[in-house]
């Protein structure tokens, strides 16, 4: 039983959970959390393949990509709120 618990299988499970979460969850903030899980599983898979230089680069760039993704989500949400307020003002 314990022979199945390796870095590769745990990383693959985390990667799959993150992928399914991104597809299934509707809220953008929940998708960001699942993206972090996906990135963790991805880095674990890279480490298990012994590509440590690539894993180091991924570990550096993944948080940067997450921050950029969060900034994009907030900007899109602001634009949607402004358009909704304009439409409500035109209807009233």
Image: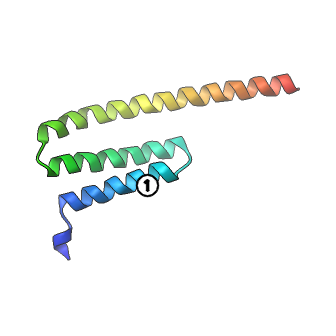
Most distant residue in the bottom direction: 1
Most distant residue in the right direction: 92
Against 42, is 75 above or below? Answer: above
Q: Secondary structure at mark 1?
A: helix
Residue 88 picture location, percent across and down: 81, 28
Name the quadrant of the C terminus: top right
Relative side of 23 to 85, left or right? left
Task: Tell me what residue is drawn at x 20 percent, y 33 percent.
Answer: 57
Residue for badge 1: 20
Task: Tell me what residue is drawn at x 49 percent, y 28 percent.
Answer: 72
Relative side of 41 to 67, left or right? left
Relative side of 7 to 90, left or right? left
Category of crowding for the residue at label 1, using alpha-carbon neighbours closer than 10 angstroms: few (below 14), some (14–19), many (at least 20): some
Residue 8 picture location, percent across and down: 20, 58
Q: In the rendered picture of this protein, how many numbered marks are placed on residues?
A: 1
Task: Tell me what residue is drawn at x 73 percent, y 29 percent.
Answer: 84
Residue 22 picture location, percent across and down: 46, 48
Relative side of 70 to 90, left or right? left
7 and 49: which is toward the camera: 49
Residue 90 picture location, percent across and down: 84, 22
Name the quadrant of the N terminus: bottom left
Q: What kind of colouring is applied to the model shown?
A: rainbow
Against 77, is 4 above or below? Answer: below
Q: Hey, which quadrant is residue 52 in on the image? A: top left
Against 41, is 64 above or below? Answer: above
């Amino acid at each position: 039983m314990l022979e199945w618990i390796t870095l590769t299988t745990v990383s693959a499970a985390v990667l799959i959970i993150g992928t399914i979460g991104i597809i299934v969850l509707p809220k953008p903030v929940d998708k960001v959390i699942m993206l972090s899980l996906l990135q963790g599983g991805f880095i674990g898979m890279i480490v298990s393949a012994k590509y440590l230089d690539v894993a180091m680069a991924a570990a550096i760039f993944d948080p940067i990509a997450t921050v950029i993704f969060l900034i994009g989500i907030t900007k899109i949400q602001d634009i949607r709120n402004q358009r909704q307020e304009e439409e409500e003002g035109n209807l009233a």
